[in-house]
Image (tube, grey):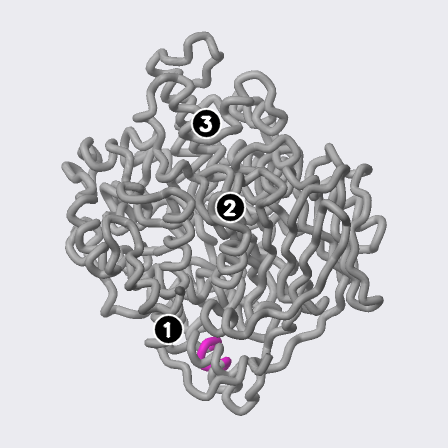
Amino acid sequence: MNLKGYANRIAHVDMTNGQVDVQPIPEDWALKYIGARGLGVRYMLEAGPTVDPISPDNWLCFMNGPLTGTAANMSGRMAIVTKSPLTGTVTDSHHGGWSAARLRWSGYDGLIFKGKADSPKYLYIEEESNTIELRDASHVWGKGIHETIKTFQKEYGRKDLTVMAIGQAGENLVKYACWVNEDDRASGRGGTGCVGGSKNLKAVVIKAKKKMPKPASRENWKPAHSRALSSIMDEANITSPKKGGLSVYGTNVLMNITNTMGALPTLNGRTTSFGERAELLSGEYVNDNILVNDPTCHACPVACKKEVKITEGEFAGLQMESVEYEPAWALGANCGNDNINSVAKMIDQANDFGMDAIEIGDVLATYIEATTKGWTNGDGGLAEGDYMSMVATIEKVAHREGVGDVLADGVDAVANHFGHPEIAMSVKGQGIPAYDPRGLKGMGIAYATSNRGACHLRAYTPAAELNIMPFQSLSVDPLEWKGKGELVKIFQDIHAFSDSLDLCKFSAFAMGADEYAQQYAAFVGIDEFTADDVLLTGERIYNLERYYNNLAGLGEGSDYLPKRFTEEPSTNPGSEGHVCELDLMLDEYYTARGWENGVVPEGKLKELAIL
């Protein structure tokens, strides 16, 4: 195709017959949907939105964007796109580290897996010998991800190698199982690892030397790249290396902030603050007590990852990467647990078993509430803050043993099993992340309208509500609902574009649509591409996802919040007395989108050239 920057090679892997067919990318798809998230969803439309997520007919797409693995800052991201067994929606889940870059350096923009193998397999790609083939994975089936990775490192050497694998959770079809690479970077949400397990696909192993793609226009690339880097390095931004809050404390810099403002959903959202105990889970506490290293991903100066080592207590000797805000909340405050060492242990468990650390925290919190209220009906029980029992329960979930078989199907399944669906803090079947919509109202409309179920990354409104981005014109009151529908649309569109490049979401704490537009245009060789084009393209991608979901059966009324957030006022300082006014925000949002109660009309699809 005429666009530069792409390898223009997608490997279609038929798990059933073992054949690999390498095909170019349709150029009109690349122009409309860019890559990674957007292009992955367009391919998924070909698989059919009504497909059973764990049937051989579902597709599993590992997709890069045109900037992946390049000199672009924060360009070490890959999107894994499929139909989610947890939500029934199309889903994309991104991970960092070096695996995305190595896929690009091996000469591929993506891998699409179809069918089901009759025995465990892994895909092996070697750039030097131009090898791409399925190989027997029987020797690693049943192993955790960490042991699986070590096994392949012994076979192929650590140099120039990346491994993406599923663990026992994926093999046992835990509905929120995920893919994890050698840097413990996870494509966590939506059950992508469950889809891998359903296909008997254990791992993707890539051997490729560093081979940075070159921009189409070096003349235009240099200023675009310099402008983006200067925004990241600016000491006024939280991305500033070794100085900004994100770089110094990682994502967990948010724990004390959201707790103080009454926006930290605690004990399954029964309250909006963990009080003084939140400090014991915070990035500041981690930094002062257990931090040993802050590694980074491909082409990223920020280094937000926080590697820790436990030196005392039940988990002494554990060294793991990394204690992030979302799982620290999910397995901490959400479950009434303030023991940071146990949180590190459980995140490490999630990484090794290959399961979403957010979702397992939500599942445990739901189980704890059912226990507290006497609803478990003999199916065991789990007490608030009982971290040793939490550790044991996670093991049961990974192997679907005992009550773990119920917990393995997600928050909604757990709440329904105990006869109280109202305690499921979820949207479209996916558990909420670490922001309470009563204290951060933008998150309420963002959760409700997310195309992949409850999610903070479709529209990261805390960037504006907590004033942690450089664009002051977007700063808003976290407790005000007016304007949040329109704000969420803007965030959803710009994030859909950056996820398709594929740049780290944290780039949005420094860059805006102008920086994205300039880098994209220079790299692929488009003469003119503006901030308005970024938003239009993002809108097209977001509408494509919603169109897929509509075809999959998610029609009117599928955008909602748990009633706890809309009917039970917060009782904590910062948000006391507040509920989330979802219905008012939905009206505003649908007007901005041009949708009919959550459904994309045909006219909008034609306007955006989707049909």
Q: Which residue is mark 2?
A: 83
Q: Name the residue type under label 2.
A: Lys
Callout 1: few (<14), some (14-19), or many (20+) C-alpha neighbours within 10 Å? some
The answer to which of 59 and 592 lies nearer the viewer is: 59
Of badges 2 and 3, the one in the foreground is 2
* Residue located 83% across and 54% down the image: 156
Q: Position of residue 578 (x, y in %)?
A: 16, 39
Magenta part of the chain: 225-229
Residue with the most extreme top position: 378
- Quarter of image, res 543: bottom left
Which is the main secondary structure of the residues drawn in magenta?
helix
Residue 134 shows in the view: yes
Q: Name the residue type under label 1.
A: Ala
Q: Position of residue 589 (x, y in %)?
A: 22, 55
Circle 1 SS class: helix
Q: Name the residue type under label 3.
A: Leu
Of badges 2 and 1, the one in the foreground is 2
In the figure, is residue 244 to the left or right of 436?
right
The answer to which of 91 and 549 lies nearer the viewer is: 549
Callout 3: few (<14), some (14-19), or many (20+) C-alpha neighbours within 10 Å? many
Report how far apart the C-alphas of labels 2 and 3 lie in the structure: 24 Å
Q: Tags 2 and 1 in contact by the CB under 8 Å rule?
A: no
Q: Which residue is mark 1?
A: 513
Image height check: is 227 above or below 204?
below
The answer to which of 159 and 501 lies nearer the viewer is: 501
**Residue 364: numbered disc:** 3
